[in-house]
């Protein structure tokens, strides 16, 4: 993997790079990916998977079209285990995607910055959520999730960053991450992997 030799220039990062290379894939149905991301917020991976499975069951086990989600009664979405707030946010995503003609093809032509700018307008969608979509939905290689708790913990441990002042910590993180461009996403994947192992 060409990203490996680039990331290995950072000696500390090099010490945690696994031999197992990560492969980023582009997924289809990105508006639904965004909804899934909202559903999984503040939940364990296991619980999130259960809720997403129940969500698909509402549509015969297949990923629905955006307008089908918009037409789903709120009670039905509440019944699969979503909070009122999350039901609202999912409907917001559906409405926004219809109004702005957001499709996989449209997003594929846009830059990371433009996608973030566009989608954070949706109530319930923050920068972190869009960054996850860029990484795991669009397979973008150069995304750095500075607000991700796992990345913060991993970098504070690896680079001995003091986490007392959030702003200073994040500035140091961003400085370090600049060296990883154009492969910041892979660095994040290795940091998560190292933290979890």
Image (spheres, rainbow, N blue to C red):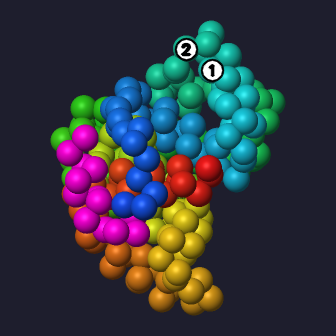
Please tell me whether residue 111 belongs to the stretch shown in magenta. Answer: no
Q: Where the N terminus falls, by quadrant?
A: top left
Name the residue rendered at 53%, 49% in the picture: 193
**CA–CA distance between discs 2 and 1?**
6 Å
Is 79 situated above or below 100? above
Judge from the rendering whether residue 48 lies leftward or rightward of residue 156; answer left or right: right
Label 1: how many Cα within 10 Å (few below 14, some 14–19, many 20+): few
- The earlier-in-sequence mark between 2 and 1 is 1
196, 151: nearer the viewer: 196
Is 63 situated above or below 79? above
Please tell me whether residue 8 belongs to the stretch shown in magenta. Answer: yes
Q: Is residue 96 visible?
A: no
Q: Is residue 17 visible?
A: yes
Disc 1 on helix, strand or loop?
A: helix
Disc 2 on helix, strand or loop?
A: loop
Question: What residue span does the magenta drawing correspond to?
Answer: 1-13
94, 128: nearer the viewer: 128
43, 108: nearer the viewer: 43
Is 119 situated above or below 172? above
Q: Could you say which disc has been placed on residue 153 in the image?
A: none
Name the residue rendered at 62%, 51% in the picture: 196
Name the chief secondary structure element in magenta: helix
Q: Which residue is mark 1?
A: 56
Of all residues, the one furthest to the top in this rendering is 60
Q: Which residue is mark 2?
A: 62
Label 2: how many Cα within 10 Å (few below 14, some 14–19, many 20+): few
Name the residue rendered at 56%, 28% in the picture: 69
Judge from the rendering whether residue 173 lies leftward or rightward of residue 92; answer left or right: left
Q: State if disc 1 and disc 2 touch (CB < 8 Å).
A: yes
Q: How many marks?
A: 2
Q: Quadrant of residue 46?
A: top right
């Amino acid at each position: 993997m060409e990203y490996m030799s680039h990331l290995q220039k950072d000696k500390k990062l090099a010490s945690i790079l696994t031999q197992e290379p990560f492969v980023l894939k582009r997924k289809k149905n990105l508006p639904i990916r965004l909804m899934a991301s909202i559903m999984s917020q503040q939940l364990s991976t296991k619980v999130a998977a259960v809720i997403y499975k129940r969500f698909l069951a509402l549509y015969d086990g297949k990923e629905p079209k955006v307008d089908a989600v918009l037409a789903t009664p709120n009670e039905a979405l509440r019944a699969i285990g979503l909070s009122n707030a999350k039901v609202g946010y999912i409907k917001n995503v559906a409405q926004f995607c219809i109004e702005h003609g957001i499709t996989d093809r449209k997003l594929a032509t846009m830059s990371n910055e433009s996608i973030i700018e566009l989608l954070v307008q949706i109530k319930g969608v923050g920068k972190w959520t869009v960054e996850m979509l860029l990484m795991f939905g669009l397979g973008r290689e150069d995304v750095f999730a500075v607000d991700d708790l796992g990345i913060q913990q991993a970098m504070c441990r690896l680079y001995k960053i003091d986490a007392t002042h959030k702003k200073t910590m994040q500035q140091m993180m961003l400085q370090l991450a600049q060296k990883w461009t154009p492969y910041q996403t892979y660095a994040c994947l290795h940091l998560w992997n190292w933290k979890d192992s």
